[in-house]
Image (cartoon, coloured by chain):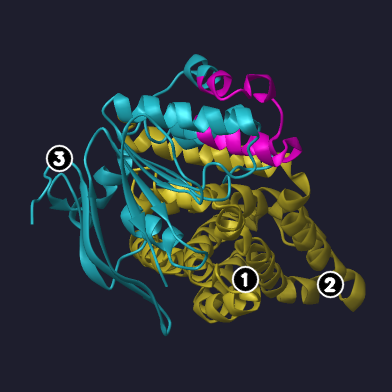
Amino acid sequence: MNIAPDGLEFEKVHVWRGDRHVLQGVSANVRPRELLHISGPNGTGKTTLLRVLSGLLRPEQGSVRWLGQSIMTFRTEYQASLAYASHEPALKGDLTALENLHFAVGLKRRITAEELHAALDRTGVGACADLPARVLSAGQRRRVALARVLAMSATVWLLDEPYTNLDASGADLVSGLLQAHVQGGGLALVVAHHELRLPCSIRRLELNS
Amino acid sequence: MKVGAWRAFVLIVYRELCLSFRRPEHLFQPLVFFLIVTTLFPLGLSLQLSQLRDIAPGVLWVAALLSSLLSLDSLFKSDADDGTLEQLALSGQGLTLIVVAKTCAHWLLTGLALVVVSPIVAIALGIPTAAFATMMMSLALGTLTLSWLGAIGAGLTIGLRRGNVLLSLIVLPLATPLLIFGAAATERAISGTSAVGALYFLAALCVFTCTLAPFAATAALRITLE
């Protein structure tokens, strides 16, 4: 099998949750300038796969390699080059949108308030920067979470259903961000239920129960 | 540009302080509990001053342990519930640093705050002012140790629905040496004898947990995050 030393590769990943065999030998690889679209019915382990690929969950069998090296051997460094957006926006309701970004992105890289404002403007929630996250709507929270992914300027994007709660312009925004990221040399792994139509190289991975 | 460990530590501590001050009721709850419990004793027992001084160390320490325990439950749980714990774990800073910073912030907000208000309680319990320094020192060491023990317990019980009951069951037995030596130090300070032995023991326990508990708590958290 052709190993891609410059990308993210996972091979025969098996995960059990209790008695349930959630991931049954999933393999794929993604290189820079590529997008992996992960789809499948509910409960087939799409989120579990993303957690395995982020290094949060250690698979019972199989390997995940980034740049040809197992991610478990250099997990912290690997995670520094990663932006993960779970299906929940992961914002602190008591902090403002800007503070949420500041504390999350500030751990990854040094960032100025202007850059954070720019990221929020780009995702269309610049006006909400100083509002506590708990007063934002679900769609606005999703946009703040997207701004966080954007501001991290990470190489690998792991997005879990980024289109949820977004209106039509929001969906276009996600597509635009993904396209810019992939064309800029990054790679993205996206869990989505509908067809992704982007002018870039898309690989597909369908999970079945 | 990569963020250094110290900068990340300061940022997380600042985050915890911000979050706490936005919710003052959570911040003051353990302190108010501590003040109420300790001031109820002298009111309820109607003792002579000498008798009050005899029970004061025990009352002070039991109240301090229980009120610290009140706030331990939320150490990781609120972050785990809204998904921000995952974001912290994936920040590329290493989970141990996150655990250390969060636990230090927790101690600043509960343990240190307890130490600061303890003279008020001490006056209510008739503890002589000469004993304040020893009492505060023993409380500082004891609450810091307890925060570390609690971090292990809190890490293990995040995913459980009735986690706080189990958390008490895990932490309280481990905290009994603190109660014994802490109360002993305070008692000796009240009676005017040297409390150095008990304080050294507390300091030893504190160093022991400060060095080993971060790794145990990280391992516990790693398991529950999976």
Q: Secondary structure at mark 2?
A: helix
State whether discs 2 and 1 lie on one chain: yes
Mark 2 crowdedness (10 Å alpha carbons): few <14, some 14-19, many ≥20: some
State whether discs 1 and 3 lie on one chain: no
Host chain of mark 1: B
Nearer-the-camera pick, A189 or B51: A189
Q: Report the disc number at residue A6.
A: 3
Tell me: residue A162, above or below residue B34.
above
User: Which residue is drawn at the image coordinates 71% and 33% (left, top)?
Assistant: A132
Q: Secondary structure at mark 3?
A: loop
Q: Report the disc number at residue B13.
A: none
Q: Which is the main secondary structure of the residues drawn in magenta?
A: helix
In three-dimensional space, the C-alpha distance between marks 2 and 1, rounded to whole angstroms, equals 17 Å
Q: What tint does the image give chain B?
A: yellow
Please state the horizontal and vertical placement of residue B17, each as a whole percent of the image: 60, 40
Host chain of mark 3: A
Please state the horizontal and vertical placement of residue B217, each as a whole percent of the image: 41, 64
Label 3 amino acid? Asp
- Magenta run includes residue A109: no
Label 2 amino acid? Phe
- Residue beneath disc 2: B41
Host chain of mark 2: B
Q: Secondary structure at mark 1?
A: helix
Could you tell me if residue A95 is visible in this image?
A: no
Tell me: residue B23, above or below residue A208.
above
In three-dimensional space, the C-alpha distance between marks 1 and 3, rounded to whole angstroms, equals 66 Å
Give the extent of the magenta segment.
A119-147
Label 1 amino acid? Glu
- Residue beneath disc 1: B187
